[in-house]
Image (cartoon, rainbow, N blue to C red):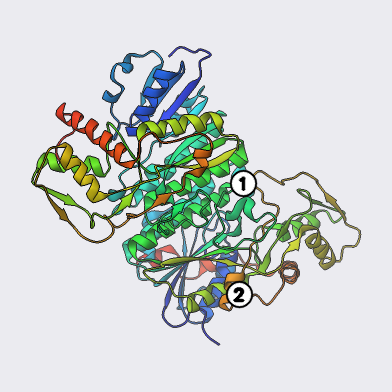
Amino acid sequence: MERILGNSVKKIFVTGGAGFIGSHVVDQLVSQGYQVCAYDNLSNGRREYISAHCGKPNFKFINDDILNVDCLRKSLNGYDLVWHLAANTDIIGGAQNPRRDLNDCVVGTFNVLEAMRLNGIKLLFFSSTGAVYGELCHDTPVAEDAGPLLPVSTYAAGKIGSEAFISAFCHLYGIHAWIFRFGNVVGGRMTHGVIYDFINKLRANPAELLIKGDGRQEKNYFLVEECIDGMGWAFRNIPMSDETPCDIFNLGTTSVSKVTDIAAMIKTEMRLSKTEIIIEGTKRAWPGDQPRVHITVSRMKKLGWVTRHTSDEAVRIAARRILNSGSKFKDPEHCSNTPLGQETFINE
Amino acid sequence: MKSSSKKRYFITGGAGFIGAHLVNRLLDTTEAEVIVYDNFSTGRRWPFGERVNNKRLKIIEADVSDLDRLKSAMAGSEVIYHLAANSDIARAANEPGIDFWNSLCLTFNVLEAMRLGGMKRILFASGSGVYGDVPPIPLPEAYPRSIPVSTYGAAKLSGESFISAYSHMFGIKGSVLRFANVVGPHQTHGVAYDFIRRLLKDKNRLLIYGDGRQSKPYIFIDDVLDAFMLIEHEQTAGYDIFNVGTADYLTVTQIAGIISDKMKLKNVVFDYTGGARGWKADVPVYRLNTDKIRSQGWQNRLNSRQAVEAAVAAMLEDARLGKIAPAP
């Protein structure tokens, strides 16, 4: 089987590498023999997600923040490609503290771009979101060239700002970037999101499940391994050029799942028959919420890539993984016992 | 400034090129109080003239990056005009952090000060740079895909995005005006300003970046102020974007010709550096579709040539008074 990034690159730097998506990226890259550095401040990421790789010669973990410019610049030296996933994932929190979306997303991305420019690194993956389409994608599925982008959350504004600076840096400094606007990525190790929330709520109180909003929310869900596969596929098959140094790809399934169906599926998977599902009834669950996000993935489809699973299948599989992972990670400090971490890396 | 029931404007970058004109217009045509908030990095006091003694004008020398200062200075203001930004696009090509910290992060601070202080109205000076490297057709506001090629354009586009988000999340009413190249008296930068300074230094040769065929629409400052005043009062949507520009354009070589004529210089040699772009982050040719703001009743009084001619005449007068120095 072809390696995910082919043979043109060897050393990969994964920001947010201990997070939900990042740790899955690390799993694949390390097992396929790439030299991998996971860079993560462990605010959302967890040490145990990457502890399986600690001690392997082709893996390094740096416990630091992308807001730490000095550390980031030193750490990035010598890498071929930056897989930039680090970001604030607490979308709801934006209403209380919008500055997190500026700092963790836009400032973080700017720091990554500056570190790349100063280290002469030319390849970048960026995880953006379908939320950038704002009200445009409420009822009809939108493609990559839909606009204008009128974001309704600081989370989405932060992603647009990041995309904008990536575009500028690509045109000014010869960086090639693949920007992916994700549907909802699901799977094991999720630390947020509707599936994660419903399972936690039902574990706490199996008698009832409150669905925020009007219950008509619909979004596109796809599995984390398919997300990673799609990014690698785009990198191998869609080269950038000086003419088009960066491009944008919607990534997800061609189907959507309704929030009420998700609740029912999780209820079934947890073998709960008596849970009462209550719909709160307000229009938006929180300021900045986008109850319906419809993106079309026809561009990737036309180019030759689709997901294997439907949105509903992805939700069910992800729910099972979370339910089965209950006691999988028993030793959260495992990685710290290995001769790794910031010091060994910086002095290399 | 004593407290009163008068409407109060708060203008970041209020001592800059567009800012000072806006302040003068507000003082001259309304009864409102005006607070200028400016760090005077490019701002100046002399364009206010006698108005510096006007009791309705308050000038605060401070930086928008200082959120605490900004918050307290803004208290009690009704309408925020956010004009503070780095305006030196060419310099930022080699120092991308300038646009990031001195444009985007300032816009964010203004929004935060408004959210924390309960202010609800902002107008933002954006620019054609948000569209980036797109076809040279008249671009409508709803043009689907922005591809910024400069950190200036990126900072404006991301600033707009945060205003959009704040308007949805926190009930702030936001107006974004995307200007063509703005010209007028007391410019602090721009191609005509640069050419005049170079010719003041050496009246025989003029250095021109690029091939001189860069062609852009130019809009006179008074027409820009008309657009601001109109949208401030007439916009109904919670968040909206308007292109503001002339329907014609000038090439850089034409501008060099206008200036040589006005300076009565006969045999200036134009030294072109060559290449389509004036500098790395330049968008050499762009057009704006301005139907949207025209349908609201706005029109430009001067076309591109008239605008540049008027601006050049005013700048030459400033130069005669010693307010514009020859190029170093």
Q: Residue, x 65% and y 75% (percent of image)?
A: A307
Residue B70 position, x and y percent, is 44, 30
Mark 2 or 1: in front is 2
Q: Which mark is residue A93?
A: 1
The residue carrying pointer 1 sits among few (fewer than 14), some (14 to 19) or many (20 or more) residues within 10 Å by Cα, namely some
User: Residue A20 vs residue B202: left or right?
Assistant: right
Q: Which mark is residue B182?
A: none
Residue A195 position, x and y percent, is 73, 61
User: Residue B103 vs residue A226: left or right?
Assistant: left
Q: Name the subunit of mark 1.
A: A
Q: Amino acid at mark 2?
A: Lys
Q: Is residue A334 visible?
A: no
User: Residue A32 vs residue A294: left or right?
Assistant: left
Q: Name the subunit of mark 2.
A: A
B301 and B106: which is toward the camera: B301
User: Residue B201 vs residue B214: left or right?
Assistant: left
Which quadrant is home to the N terminus of chain B? top left
Q: Are marks 2 and 1 on the same chain?
A: yes
Q: Is residue A214 visible?
A: yes
Displayed quadrant of residue B193: top left
The residue carrying pointer 2 sits among few (fewer than 14), some (14 to 19) or many (20 or more) residues within 10 Å by Cα, namely some
B189 and A67: which is toward the camera: B189
Residue placed under numbered mark 2 in the picture? A301
When the figure is inspected, residue B243 is found, relative to residue A28, above or below; the finding is: above
Point out the tag, 2 or 1, that comes first from the N-terminus. Answer: 1
Residue A202 position, x and y percent, is 80, 57
Q: Amino acid at mark 1?
A: Gly
